[in-house]
Structure formats: structure tokens, C-alpha cells
Amino acid sequence: MTRILAITNQKGGVGKTTTGVNLAASLATAKQRTLLVDLDPQGNATMGSGVDKRGLHATVYQVLLGVKRIAEVRIRSESGQYDLIPANRELAGAEVEMVELERRETRLKEALSEIATDYDFILIDCPPALNLLTVNGLTAAQAVMIPMQCEYYALEGLSDLVQTIKKVRGHLNPELQIEGLLRTMYDPRNTLAQQVSAQLLEHFGGKVYRTVIPRNVRLAEAPSHGVPALKFERHSKGAEAYLALAGEMLNRAATG
Ligand SMILES: Nc1ncnc2c1ncn2[C@@H]1O[C@H](COP(=O)(O)OP(=O)(O)OP(=O)(O)O)[C@@H](O)[C@H]1O
Ligand SMILES: [Mg+2]
């Protein structure tokens, strides 16, 4: 059974891409066949996977427009030991160009169905917006993983996202679940972070991953080398946190 997760938060810079790259590499380390889909014109997940976004002939853009099959654009992240559907700035045009197309919300879902059986996990790195690309991600996914920083406005942003998830459930993907909320860039000495974290646990309970991702400079440095943190410094706090997250997810799956 393939598990397809959309990593989503319309707020920018909360750790979506860092989670996509490092979780994909951690799942691969745990012998899970993993695919990472870059659904952001920034192409950060592509670069962070060690693939130069500027030199690509075909990306997820052509797949969404229906001019390439998804298997044709799939490449290997050698540094992460997972497969990648890359993206670059071309994808910024898709939003406008897809408006004219039929079935524009289900294009990623249909494409992924061609290769899904090759994988145990498919992670979709969504852009920081509740736009048509993100809707494609949410429609293709079984569940949403929400990385968030424990800041003052975090809970407010969350209610917009929950509304969008409800809309997608209503029209496009009735089965869509919230897989979990992930506390990122966490600083346990910060009182506000502690308070927001406590509120999250109160509101979302078991949906909050027990694993917390700390603020760790290795996680921020690794992308400039095109490697996940576990290849950059295996025993860094950041790399170990993402390995623990993969373990938590696999445990949850095993115990239901
Ligand atoms: N746990 C962490 N510790 C330190 N730095 C981090 C951590 N997580 C992410 N960062 C850094 O914070 C920045 C934003 O992270 P990232 O790109 O993963 O967020 P994002 O949600 O994907 O952003 P965007 O919304 O622009 O796509 C990056 O420079 C990244 O290296
Ligand atoms: Mg990102």
C-alpha cells in the first residue's frame, strides 16, 4: 500500500521543503521505496536533493500540462537514495495555463497513479500558497502533513489551511485526512514556543507528532551541498530528528 502525503502550509519558510528532503532520505534509510514530488516553482526540494534545477529538460510542469508522462521526468536523488519529480521556475506558469484545461485539479493525482505502486511513500512538497498547485497536491494525497513553527500567528494560519482541507474533501478528495502536525525549528527555551506547542497539543492531541524538529544549523547548511542532513552530518540533532520522525511514522502505520 502506497502512502501519499502532501506537505503543506501556506505560510512560507516553516520547513516544508526541509521536511520533504530529510524525511524522504530518512524513509529511504529505513528501506522504504520513496518518491519526493517538488510542486514548488522555487525548486528548493529539487536543489536540496542534489539535482540542478537549471539544467532540466522536463519537470513536473510538463506532466501537469499533459505533454510528458510522469515516468519520463522522474530522476534519482543519488544523495538521498530516493526518486524525485523535479520542478523549476517554469512551473510558475502552470497556475495560469492550467485554468484552461479540463480536470485541472486532478492532474497530479492521475499522473501519480501511473507510478504509485513503485513506492511505499510519496511525499509532495507544496508551495507556500493555497493555489491550484497546492490543490493538486491535496487532491493527490491521502493525508496532509503540516510543518509549523510554534509562533504567535501559527494557529491562525492553521485554521485557513483546515478550511481548505475541508473544501478539498467536499469537492475533490473525500478521504483526505490530516496525517499530522510537525513542530519545526523548535527552541525549547523559548516560552512562546512552549505555549503555542501546548495549545497545539490541546487542540489537535494525537495528531501532533511526538517527534519535534529542533532548530539546527546543519539542516540549513545541507541544501547548499545538495544533500540531506543525514548525509552531511549523520549525528547532527537535525538529521537525528528526521530519522526519529520516519520511525514514528512507520510505527504509527504498523500499530494503526
Ligand atoms: N529545523 C531547522 N533548523 C534550522 N533551519 C531550518 C530548519 N528547518 C528549515 N530551516 C531553514 O529555514 C528556511 C526555510 O525552510 P524551508 O525552505 O524548508 O521552508 P518552506 O516551508 O519549504 O519554505 P517555502 O514556504 O518558501 O517553500 C531554510 O533556509 C531552511 O534551511
Ligand atoms: Mg519550500
Image (cartoon, rainbow, N blue to C red):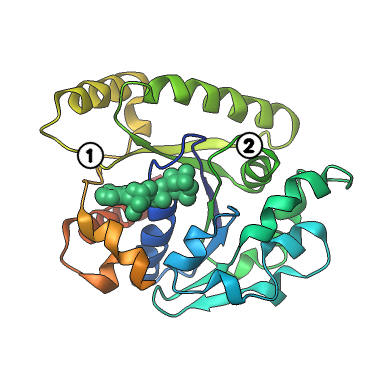
Residue 129, picture quadrant: top right
Give the residue at x 28% y 19%: 199
Above or below residue 79? Residue 122 is above
Above or below residue 76? Residue 180 is above
Name the outermost residue toward the bottom: 78
Q: Is residue 80 visible?
A: yes
Label 2 element class: loop
Badge 1: few (under 14), some or many (20 or more) residues near its Cα, within 10 Å? many
On screen, residue 108 versus residue 100, left or right, reads left
Q: Nearer the viewer, residue 218 or 238?
A: 218
Do tag 1 and tag 2 residues touch (Cβ < 8 Å)? no
Would you say the beta carbon of the disc 1 residue lies within 8 angstroms of ligand 1?
A: yes
Where residue 69 sits: x, y (%)? 77, 70
Give the residue at x 76% y 52%: 107
- Residue type at the position of mark 1: Tyr
Question: In which quadrant is the C terminus drawn?
Answer: top left
The residue tagged 2 is 175
Where residue 120 sits: x, y (%)? 51, 64
Where residue 49 sits: x, y (%)? 44, 69
On screen, residue 163 versus residue 221, left or right, reads right
The residue tagged 1 is 186
Q: Nearer the viewer, residue 104 or 47?
A: 47
Give the residue at x 76% y 57%: 64
Residue 122, picture quadrant: bottom right
- Residue type at the position of mark 2: Glu
Residue 135, picture quadrant: top right
Badge 2: few (under 14), some or many (20 or more) residues near its Cα, within 10 Å? few
First of labels 1, 2 by sequence position: 2
Label 1 element class: loop
